[in-house]
Amino acid sequence: MAIFSILNRKSKKKSEDGEEREMSFVEHLEELRMHIIRAVIAIASFAILVYFITDFVFRKIIFYPLSTDFPTYKLMCWVSDLLKMPIVCITPVKSQVQTFDMGEAFTLHVKVCIVGGIIMAFPYILWELWKFIKPGLHKKEIKAARGAVAYTSILFMIGVAFGYFILAPFSINFLVGYQLPMVNEEASMIKAGSFINYMIMFTIPSGLVFELPIIIFFLSRLGIITDKDMRTYRRHSIIGILVIAAIVTPPDVLSQMIVAFPIFILYELSIGIAARQTKRREKEVGINKEYEDL
């Protein structure tokens, strides 16, 4: 398995006399430390960038789903006019965002900068991880994983975009618009910390969930799972998908269904990926067996 080859990898390093030698465990830790440091520097650099564009980030990204100009609301209303179905048109619930604790604004600002830095630096973080893992892989494994950083980054960004443009507006409207008796219905007061925490929960977990095809690709490539297994346990997987959707979304059925549906689509697509990789692995095993018989 790849994970064991990584732990037991025998990377080479040139010594002072010019000859190659195996790297020691301490040298591997030093190498890992340098990759982590570079990744942290990338996160810090993007976090500083977010700090300098604070007004844009908060007005046009963080709190933008509360505005009527948000693209999702415009699209839904356009579809509503096209289909002559007024119920499809969704507008944000009137609300006001406030900070209630001393120092909350500063804490939230730092949190947004760090989270923004992580999201923006995600492709580079994957690249540093790949550079650390690559020397411990065989040539076939490296060939199979070609483009993994790009595909993983793209799927993560698609997941983040899905959480931001689809999950967030529907969930926010449901949660903010849910009223109780004797509560002011003219404008709901939203705690800024609560809103930002929900926005983080809508986006980053969605990005990670969208990595399912990549995970299935490597598991099927290693022979840990096959398309037959995925078809056999499809019903169990549906329950698991609903549980995951319940974990990464607020406690409302609408948000859970919005998340569960694309995960199920990704699961079905992953079956095709697993089938292709299983056939390829069986073909390679057959070729190696014929070679050994010769």
Image (cartoon, grey):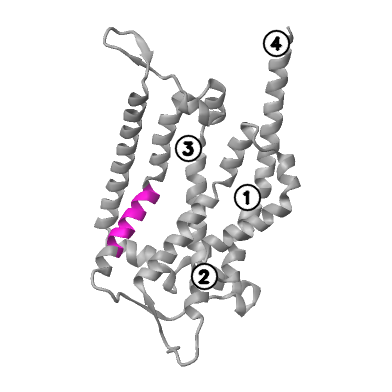
Picture coordinates of residue 4, whole percent (x, y): 52, 28
User: Label 2: which residue?
Assistant: 171
User: Label 4: which residue?
Assistant: 292
Picture coordinates of residue 227, whole percent (x, y): 71, 40
Identified at 54% across, 70% down, the residue is 251
Q: Which residues are magenta?
A: 108-120
Where the C terminus falls, by quadrant? top right
**Which is more N-terminal, label 3 or label 4?**
3
Where the N terminus falls, by quadrant? top right
Res 188 quadrant in image: bottom left
User: Label 1: which residue?
Assistant: 266
Identified at 48% across, 39% down, the residue is 150
Is 70 located above or below residue 49 in the figure?
A: below
Residue 239 placement, left or right of 1: right
Neighbours of disc 3 within 10 Å: few (<14), some (14-19), many (20+): some
- Rounded to the nearest angstrom, the CA distance separating label 4 from label 3 is 34 Å
User: Label 3: which residue?
Assistant: 149
Q: How many marks?
A: 4
